[in-house]
Image: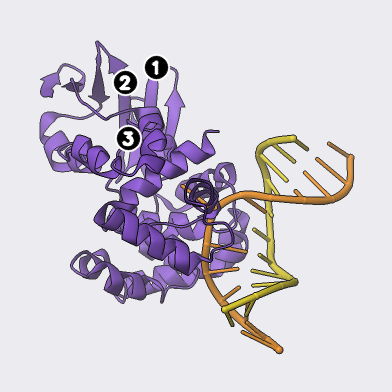
Chain colours: A purple, B orange, C yellow
Amino acid sequence: MEIRQTASGVFLKDIEHFDPIQIFECGQAFRWVKAKDGFLGVVRGRVLKLKEIDGGFELQNTCMEEFQSVWAQYFDIYRDYGAIKTELAKDDAIKAAIDFGSGIRILNQDFWEMLISFIISANNNIPRIKGIIERLSFRYGEKITSSEGEFYAFPDSLALSCAAEEDLLRCGCGYRARYIKETARMVESGEVSFERIKDMSYREALNLLLKCPGVGHKVADCVLLFSAGKYEAFPLDVWIKRAMEKLYGLNGKNDVYIRGFAKERFGSLAGFAQQYLFYSEISR
DNA sequence: TGGCAGGGTCATA
DNA sequence: TATGACCCTGCC
């Protein structure tokens, strides 16, 4: 892989296991949109454009310094996905899913944004989840003016803890409005924070997150996997259940059993397995 | 055009 | 441990 500064950004050449469509559509991110000549994302108060050119990818509206301090970690650039896939593919059943989503990477996203985004995701569909997040950002987030136009950052915890429930309802949050407000308060008070979560074991972190209203096992696993590097997390949703039933004959087994099965089979790589299975399943 | 299902969670029994 | 309700809206 070669990384170099260009006039318009940072160019990545010969990067393996990297497919923007798969990365942005494997269920982990809600704020990337397809533009006419690439992808536009609002990430940590910044707007990034990702464009495929000359057999590589250019990250526009950024520089080398910011690449090293922000984007390399965000895109998980330095992780050896080849090794992960080789290890997981020892299990024949998941091989096809890995080949299908071979360009997936697990993004390192903002803890607070993931927490609220996945509370919103409960019993909801993806287009609507994205719409709610956009409206919350527009209503409560900082405006970002970039060469690509005007965007709005994801609102901070103070903004949402102070928001009127009525206004959250107007953004389309529905019954999740009070969960968002209360969880925002818990984050604002420091009761729940990335600082605490990051140094905890997976199990401890899970138990802390479960104290937040609107956060069950699945939502907590998403937050831990997508923002805290807890790769043993295995978010178990209806899609993954379907995939696991088909691949491993787990029909009729309950969530506890399926999670135990995944832990046994995928171990510390369970989160990566989940992403390959999810993307493969929703793409059928 | 109406009715269903949707990246689950929570309360109740 | 198992059901049903739940805001709202895409989508068939």
Residue A148 in the image: state x and y as whole percent.
37, 25
Could you say which quadrant of the image residue A229 lies in?
bottom left
Residue A197 in the image: state x and y as whole percent.
25, 67
Is disc 2 surrounded by few (<14), some (14 to 19) or many (20+) residues within 10 Å?
A: some
Residue A243 in the image: state x and y as whole percent.
51, 47
Would you name the residue on which mark 2 appears?
Answer: A51
The label number, if any, that marks residue A47 in the structure image: 3
Q: Are marks 2 and 3 on the same chain?
A: yes
Residue type for callout 1:
Asp
Q: Is residue A120 left or right of residue A264?
A: right
Q: Residue furthest top?
A: A54
Q: Is residue A19 left or right of residue A161?
A: left
Dot 1: chain letter: A
Kind of element beneath mark 3:
strand
Looking at the picture, does residue A183 appear above or below residue A43? below
Would you name the residue on which mark 1 appears?
Answer: A37
Could you say which quadrant of the image residue A30 lies in?
top left
